[in-house]
Amino acid sequence: MVIKLVFGALEGDKIDLPVHYNRPLQGLFYYLMSDTVPKYHDLGTRSEDKKLKLFTFSRIYPYSSFKVENRRMIFKGLFNIYFASPIDKLVEAVLHSLNEQKVVRIEKNYFTLRKYEVIQNEVDEEMLVKTLSPITAYSTIVLPNGNRYTHYFSPYSSDFKKLIEENLKRKASALGIVIKNNNFYIEPYGITEKNEKLLFYKDIIIKGWTGYFILKGETQLLKLALNSGLGAKNAQGFGMILSVEKNSIRERSFLELAEEG
């Protein structure tokens, strides 16, 4: 299930958030889920020897312009956040808490939910999606000196595509989703170096990619991608996607798409 949340600051106050706000925003969603699903933060969803957190969320999208001062994002008025999970109970828990509490907080910011919308993503065997938060795919190795090195892959890399597919099928297995056709295909659509984004999470730099991608495969897998996100670190605010009509952007140039992403 995918929902769009529209928030507004209390009494016209300004919103003042760190530019790299993934961690406090993740904390808000764990807090909102805690009344109904109190142990999900610790237990997650098991997949063999891994503990998956099967939800994701978008970047913050203010209705009006914003400015950046001292690594802080400052704006007024309404803003959107998208939240998704293949586990409906988690989405319902978020909505229940928002309805009960009326006012929520991130750092010193207080705001209220003005409205929400359930997003009906159209799913087909071939579809165009856009990112609502950067997609990240990486591998980590231990160097001879004992230090760990993380390499992030480009969307044009075969490793990127392989890791995205493996991650998605791992989620399907954890949820008991039976996939009749294991074929899955992801291809960047008009993505350039401008689409590479660097975000900090717990003082660690994470590289991701925004923009448009073409997905092909069994509709069960593609639906899961829309509800859980693509790639790694979904529960930290990475990899959220939304389906779009391919015809609506066919006439636009790759450069325009890259700049928008």
Image (tube, helix red, strand yellow):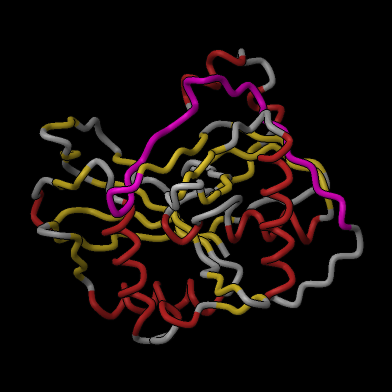
Residue located at (49% from left, 56% from top): 233
Residue 107 versus residue 134 in the image, above or below: below
Q: Is residue 57 magenta?
A: no
Q: Residue at x 75, y 77 (%)?
A: 176
Pick the front one: 176 or 140: 140
What's the magenta region? 182-204
Viewer-side residue, 163 vs 241? 163
Look at the picture and state if 164 lies above or below 223.
above
- Identity of the residue drawn at 17% across and 36% down: 71
Q: Is residue 192 magenta?
A: yes
The answer to whether residue 98 is above or below residue 63 is: below
Point 36% across, 72% down: residue = 30
Position of the N terminus, as image quadrant, is bottom right
Provide residue 39's location: percent of width, then percent of height.
42, 86
> In the rendering, at what x and y percent does residue 139 appear?
58, 47
Q: Position of residue 4 (x, y in %)?
A: 44, 55
